[in-house]
Image (cartoon, rainbow, N blue to C red):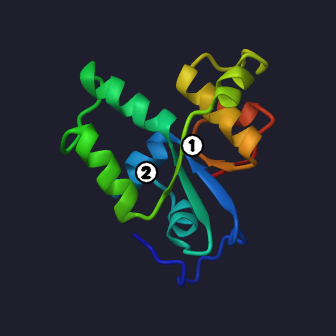
Amino acid sequence: MVSPSTSLRTGLSNQRFLLDTHTFLWWVTRDTRLPERVQVIIADPENDIFFSAVSAWEIAIKAQLGQMTLAGNPAELIPERVTANRFLTLPIEIHHALHVGGLPLLHRDPFDRLLIAQAQLEELTILTADPAIARYDVAVAW
């Protein structure tokens, strides 16, 4: 992982970001698919990095269905990694859920649609590689 003191500067300091589920997983597993630019954003202590309950829900469901392999029990692993990385948690509120109903049907993934709603309402930039999310009126960085 890189530190924000590296020569690579993003111009995205003192901002608020929401981790897409794959971004969180790639960060905590040090997956090489996570671009250095995104690593710098996450590592920068000046940025607020949010982990949504939506992602915890998605990981728990996919792990239970055998669609995802983790290095431990999600109920223990996720809170430990969120705390260790000093991520801020974002709960699912009623207004987040209701906002999903007003989104255009450009993307049918319910987890992503709820993350989009949260990002729009909370004015967060989503850190995601998913081009379907970028089709919405939401700030995306990658």
Q: Given the image, on which type of amino acid does mark 1 rest? A: Ala
Q: Given the image, on which type of amino acid does mark 2 rest? A: Arg
Q: Secondary structure at mark 2?
A: loop
Q: Nearer the viewer, residue 38 or 125?
A: 125
Q: Residue at x 25, y 23 (%)?
A: 64
Q: Nearer the viewer, residue 139 or 16?
A: 16
- 82 relative position to 123: left or right: left
Dot 1: within a 10 Å radius of its alpha carbon, few (fewer than 14), some, or many (20 or more) residues?
some
Q: Secondary structure at mark 1?
A: loop
Cα separation, mark 1 vs mark 2, equals: 10 Å
Q: Residue 125 at x, y = what percent?
A: 69, 50
Q: Residue at x 26, y 47 (%)?
A: 77
Whether residue 27 is visible to the viewer of this picture, yes or no, is yes
- Residue 33 is tagged as 2
Q: Quadrant of the N terminus?
A: bottom left
Q: Are marks 1 and 2 in contact (CB under 8 Å)?
A: yes
Q: Residue 98 at x, y = what percent?
A: 71, 21
- Position of 25 relative to 69 (above/below): below
**Sooner in the amino-acid sequence: mark 1 or mark 2:** 2
